[in-house]
Amino acid sequence: MLKKGSKLNSILTGTCPRCQEESMYVDKNPYNLPKIFEMHENCSHCGLHYQIEPSFFYGAMYVNYGLTVMVGVAAFIISKVLLGLALTPSFISIILTLIVLMPINSRLARNIYINMFVSFDKDAVKK
C-alpha cells in the first residue's frame, strides 16, 4: 500500500511524485511555520520542476478546503457523538483541531494536488 511507486506513498511522505526519491520540501517538519511552503525548485534525482506552471499550487487551496471540511466534520462527530460533549465544547474542539492540523493539511493538499498531475515513472531517475 505504501510501497514506492504508489501515489499514496508520495502523498503521505511528501516525496517527488515522479521518482519518489527526494522530499519536495526544504524542511520536512510541517510545524516549522516560516518554512511550511518552502519547496525545492526541482527534484535532484529526476529533474521534475515542482512549480509546473505559474501559480500552480493555488489549485491546492481547493483540495485544502475539502480536507479541512473533512477534518472538521470528523472532529465534530468524535466530540459530539462519541464523547458526548455539548455543542459549544464540540465547536471549540473543531477549532482547536483545525488549528493544530493546519500545517499538515496544507502540505497534504499540495501533495495531493501535484500527484493529480504527475505520475510515478521508474525510469525517470537521471543516470
Image (tube, helix red, strand yellow):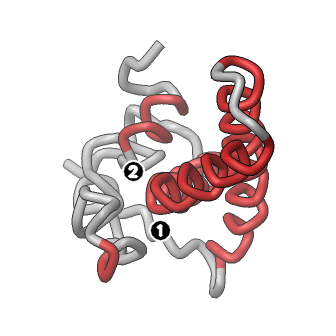
Q: Residue at x 26, y 69 (%)?
A: 32
User: On the rendered structure, is 54 left or right of 72?
Assistant: left
Residue, disc 1: 50
Residue 41 position in % (x across, y down): 36, 77
Disc 2 crowd rating (10 Å Cα; few below 14, some 14-19, many 20+) is many
Q: Looking at the image, is 93 positioned above or below residue 28?
A: above
Outermost residue on the bottom side: it is 54
Q: Which mark is drawn over residue 24?
A: none
User: On the rendered structure, is 107 left or right of 82?
Assistant: left
Residue 49 position in % (x across, y down): 45, 70
Task: Place residue 54 in its image quadrant.
Answer: bottom right
Q: Which mark is drawn over residue 16?
A: 2
Q: Residue at x 52, y 61 (%)?
A: 99
Residue 94 position in % (x across, y down): 66, 49
Residues marked 2 and 1 touching at CB (< 8 Å): yes
Nearest to the observer: residue 24 or residue 70 = 70
Name the amino acid, label 2.
Answer: Cys
Identify the element where label 2 is drawn.
loop
Nearest to the observer: residue 1 or residue 71 = 71
Can residue 117 be seen here? The reply is: no
Can residue 107 be seen here? The reply is: yes
Outermost residue on the front side: it is 86
Spatial CA distance of label 2 from label 1 is: 8 Å
Nearest to the observer: residue 122 or residue 17 = 17
Outermost residue on the top side: it is 1
User: On the rendered structure, is 65 left or right of 95?
Assistant: right
Name the amino acid, label 1.
Answer: Tyr
Answer with mark 2 or mark 1, whichever residue precedes in sequence. Answer: 2
Residue 124 position in % (x across, y down): 38, 45
Q: Residue at x 80, y 43 (%)?
A: 87
Disc 1 crowd rating (10 Å Cα; few below 14, some 14-19, many 20+) is some
